[in-house]
Image (tube, helix red, strand yellow):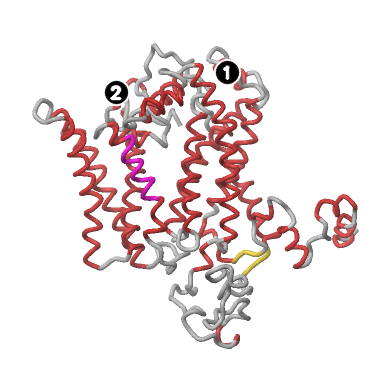
């Protein structure tokens, strides 16, 4: 039986017609109907620009993050069949999952690695979106949604950290909730709401369990769906907005020059030529041009089957990576949680250990509340600070932007480790104890030092009259690289007593990678 007759037989059945209401998608119309007539596929556009599919542009990080989330739902559902959220039974059920249930250890390893990688992929995805200028108009609000997604991802991972009820989980959550408790005025209330009391116990376990299996997954499903839909409604990925030729030189767009004949312009034809004498609103009820104005169909491909195949391959690749990681390293499970025996060192999850590192250098309220709040606000205002559409879809916007990011990264890689070392050798709160108030040693001095370290590259850049985008490149790079350095320092170089050691010279056989 030929492929054509086989597909025609399937497409002609009543079952197929009742579900898809069209024939086998072997022509442009039916390929379009596949995407528009399905609930989940309708989140995709009918066609996408070829530039959006380039690995060098997006690296597939958005799809990988969603794939990890789907794997988390599947493996988490399997674990829920056996897990009991009780301080008496949580740890025994985790042991039973690992030792007495077929593929139980493997399922937990998959879940653990998927959770860790989803946080990492979400962070890298946010960095990729920023550095490619994909937050620029008309995608400003979708960037804000992306920031919300990043916060939800961190919350979902953190609430799952307590469920094994071992020493690692207990003290990591204790450290994390203590950081939240530093919030002035509402810190004690927030910590009590999270824990259901003053200590990490049964109330905390059941609350974290509920948040982890129901609240955060539902919110993530809703917000991811809206985020994906907004990508489509905002005109697709920003890669297609880059008016660059293969050599990296700017070319004129339709809005910059008079439309040329097809043979001269290099385009087959313009689907929506941008004519200043015409309007493009829907019966003039909408202001502004459609995202497709000035674009043609010659550089697009149908989402079915090209995009779906790309997503399927990325899903398989992500699953294979998790398989390998799960076989190479099991999820840690230490002794049962014991509030009377303090783990040394007690570390927050790796994605919060950078904040724990900051606690060593300044007041807990400044490190755990104000600095994270400033960073979140900074990320939220990025698309409204740089509201020019020029440069969207291009890594670092220009060659000058690339140099700015390179030099700023090098600067941050030098000054932040020096700050950590010098502040560890000459601790201001100890040197000024009894001489100056705490507000000077733990508030004023760290604010001045951190402020100068952040402002210095911006002040240097002012000599070249930077654009808002270039200023943001400096600030975001300092923030991003500093966060990496503080995380690496807290995770790999802090040992017992949270003192600095070389990773290979930790006392008492402590392994800084054992908590991952």
**Would you say the magenta stretch is mainly helix, strand or loop?**
helix
Q: Find numbered disc 2 in the image and state the secondary structure of the residue it sits on.
A: helix
Quadrant of residue 11 within the rendered picture: bottom right
Residue 196 on image: x %, y %: 47, 21
Q: CA distance from mark 1 to mark 2?
A: 29 Å
- Given residues 154 and 194, the one toward you in this image is 194
- Residue 370 on the magenta span: yes
Residue at position x 44%, y 28% in the image:
515
Vertical position of residue 434 compared to residue 386: above or below? above
Find disc 2 in the rendering and name its residue: 497
Residue depicted at x 57% and y 14%: 89
Q: Is residue 118 visible?
A: yes
The quadrant of the rendering that contains the N terminus is bottom right
Task: Give the x, y percent position of residue 466.
Answer: 29, 66
Left or right: 47, with 454 as reference point:
right
* Disc 2: CA contacts within 10 A as few (<14), some (14-19) or many (>=20): few
Question: Label 1's element?
Answer: helix
Identify the residue at horizontal 51%, vertical 21% (top origin). Answer: 205
Residue 144 falls left or right of residue 443? right
Closest to the observer: 40 or 7? Answer: 40
Tell me the quarter of the picture where residue 402 sits. Answer: bottom left
222, above or below 307, in the image: above
On the question of residue 323 being in view, the answer is no
Badge 1 local density, few (<14 within 10 Å), some, or many (20+)?
Answer: some
The residue identified by callout 1 is 95
Task: Please state the extent of the stretch shown in magenta in the rendering.
Answer: 368-379
N-term mark: 1 or 2? 1
């Amino acid at each position: 039986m030929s492929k054509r007759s086989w597909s025609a037989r399937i497409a002609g059945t009543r079952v197929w017609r009742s579900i898809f209401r069209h024939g086998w998608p072997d022509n442009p119309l039916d390929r379009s109907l596949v995407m528009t007539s399905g609930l989940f596929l309708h989140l995709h556009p009918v066609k996408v620009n070829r530039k959006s599919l380039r690995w060098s542009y997006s690296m597939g990080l958005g799809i990988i993050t969603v794939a990890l989330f789907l794997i988390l739902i599947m493996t988490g559902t399997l674990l829920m069949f056996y897990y009991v959220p009780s301080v008496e039974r949580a740890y025994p059920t985790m042991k039973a999952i690992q030792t007495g249930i077929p593929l139980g250890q493997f399922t937990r390893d998959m879940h653990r690695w998927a959770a860790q990688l989803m946080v990492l992929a979400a962070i890298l995805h946010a960095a990729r979106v920023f550095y490619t200028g994909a937050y620029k108009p008309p995608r400003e609000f979708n960037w804000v949604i992306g920031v919300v997604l990043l916060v939800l991802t961190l919350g979902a991972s953190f609430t799952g950290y307590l469920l094994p009820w071992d020493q690692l989980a207990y003290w990591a959550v204790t450290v994390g909730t203590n950081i939240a408790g530093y919030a002035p005025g509402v810190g004690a209330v927030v910590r009590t709401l999270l824990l259901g009391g003053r200590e990490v116990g049964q109330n905390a376990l059941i609350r974290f369990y509920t948040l982890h299996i129901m609240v955060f997954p539902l919110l993530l499903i809703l917000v991811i769906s809206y985020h994906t839909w907004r990508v489509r409604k905002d005109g697709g990925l920003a890669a297609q907005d880059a008016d660059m030729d293969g050599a990296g030189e700017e070319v004129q767009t339709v809005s910059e020059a008079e439309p040329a004949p097809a043979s001269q312009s290099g385009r087959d034809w313009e689907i929506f030529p941008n004519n200043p004498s015409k309007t493009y609103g829907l019966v003039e009820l909408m202001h502004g041009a459609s995202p497709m104005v000035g674009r043609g169909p010659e550089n697009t491909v149908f989402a079915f089957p090209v995009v779906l195949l790309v997503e399927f391959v990325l899903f398989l690749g992500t699953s294979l990576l998790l398989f390998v990681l799960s076989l190479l390293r099991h999820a840690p499970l230490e002794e049962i949680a014991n509030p009377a025996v303090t783990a040394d060192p007690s570390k927050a999850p790796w994605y919060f250990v950078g904040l724990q590192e900051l606690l060593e250098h300044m007041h807990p309220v400044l490190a755990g509340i104000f600095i994270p709040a400033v960073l979140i606000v900074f990320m939220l205002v990025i698309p409204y600070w740089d509201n020019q559409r020029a440069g969207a879809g291009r890594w670092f916007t220009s060659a000058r932007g690339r140099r700015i990011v390179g030099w700023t990264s090098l600067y941050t890689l030098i000054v932040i480790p020096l700050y950590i070392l010098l502040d560890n050798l000459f601790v201001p709160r100890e040197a000024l104890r009894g001489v100056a108030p705490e507000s000077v040693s733990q508030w004023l001095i760290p604010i001045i030092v951190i402020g100068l370290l952040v402002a210095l590259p911006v002040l240097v850049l002012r000599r070249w009259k930077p654009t808002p985008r270039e200023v943001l490149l400096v600030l975001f790079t300092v923030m991003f690289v500093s966060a990496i350095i503080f995380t690496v320092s807290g995770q790999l170089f802090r040992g017992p007593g949270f003192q600095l050691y070389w990773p290979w010279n930790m006392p008492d056989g402590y392994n800084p990678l054992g908590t991952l």
